[in-house]
Amino acid sequence: MPQINSVIAASGKPKAEYLRDLVENTFFGTSSSSTSPAQNLQSVEQPTQDLSSNNLVEPSLADKIMEKYPTPIALACRRFHNAQLNVYEQMRRLIDLYEYTTFFVFNLVLADLFQRLDPIYIKDKGVRNAFKDFSMERRIKFMEEVIKVASTGHGTSLFIPELVDSAVTNYANNLKELRNELAHKGTASESVQRRILDKKKPIIDELLCELKFLIDYRLVRIPGLHYEGGQLIYQMMVYQGEVPFLDTKPIGGDLQLERSCLADRNHLVILNNQGKVLDLHPLYQLVSNEKTQDEEHMCFLKQCKDQEKRVYVESIQTSAVFALDGLDALKELAEVKLLAQPPNS
């Protein structure tokens, strides 16, 4: 059948008029044509299909993030998206979106160092211990140090080598004072909030665009493997987009899991397309206790307090911060991988 544009051009009518007449002729019998209703209906379907294929709307950045990015970032994006009618809430949610995104990338780099990479010497003690405090600036410098070392091998040593050529830390640096910029001014007027929002949101959009490669990595928990019908089946809870979902597939299909790399069944891991995993524990954990009202929350490391021997985590569901045990295990990892002296000294 001829394409709709050719048909419309041959009719000599504007597209809107042609389609209106076509629908009226088909459903209200105003056509003098001898064609049957079924033939008319078929002629309606073809233009509709042609129009829909030529006018598909590209999903917005927010839609892509809320559907495809790891859940910590997707949820933060949803909250910002839902705050469109209140500039004060928008600013608060924009800060959360920036911090949840930066924390996620920082924890990926830190987990990579703890689990896979060779020990690294970072001269600045504050940067070396960036995971212990709230400083976003130190976290960004830590990422830069690790990525710089990895770049000497063209990124092949990183679990996520795309970080080497990305400008993630550049954009994160441009936003590191976002929270302080508002906190030190008291309650800014609506116009000031709007001005800051208009200035900072494009930078956050660029930061999120730089992380588009995260779509190829899945944040998952792999609770079990079992045999069914002679095949080895894996069960995987996927934390991609706003709502986690269960994925069950046979090993040997579109994914080969490396058994030697599998983490504890309760750990959150990053899974790449080659079936390799990066264990994120204890930087990201699934927590269920009285603080979460016995519901399972995904939490990420926010701060460590040596004097209390506790780690403080934040729930991505509620943004509540609470203490957990586990500082000793974290410090042991840090002592092995974060060198206080150059390796040859």
Image (spheres, grey):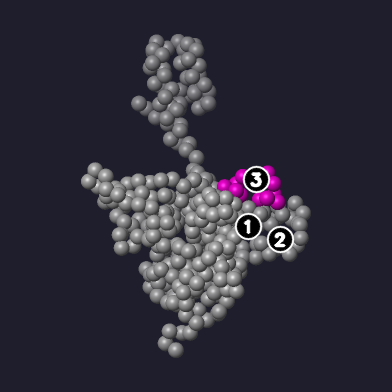
Which residue is at 53% across, 65% downward? 325
Q: Which mark is residue 295?
A: none
Disc 2 vs disc 3: Cβ atoms closer than 8 Å? no
In this picture, is 104 found above or below 58? below
Q: Which quadrant of the view contains residue 92?
A: bottom right
Number of residues whose C-alpha sits closer than 10 Å to that of mark 1, classed few (under 14), some (14–19) or many (20 or more): many
Which residue is at 69% across, 57% downward? 196
Which residue is at 65% across, 65% downward? 177
Q: Is residue 312 left or right of residue 184?
A: left
Q: CA distance from mark 2 to mark 3?
A: 19 Å
x and y percentages locating residue 249 in the rendered image: 32, 47
Q: Which mark is residue 84?
A: 3
Q: Residue furthest bottom?
A: 345
In this picture, is 56 found above or below 278? above
Label 2 secondary element: helix
Q: Is residue 36 in sight in this rendering?
A: yes
Q: Which mark is residue 95?
A: 1
| Viewer-closest of 150 and 306 | 306
Amino acid, disc 3 = Gln
Amino acid, disc 2 = Leu
Image: magenta residue range: 78-90
Task: Name which of mark 3 and mark 1 comes first in the sequence.
Answer: 3
Name the image quarter holding the C terminus.
bottom left
Task: Name which of mark 1 and mark 2 comes first in the sequence.
Answer: 1
Disc 1 vs disc 2: Cβ atoms closer than 8 Å? yes
x and y percentages locating residue 97 in the rendered image: 58, 55
Residue occupied by mark 2:
182
In this picture, is 229 found above or below 223? above
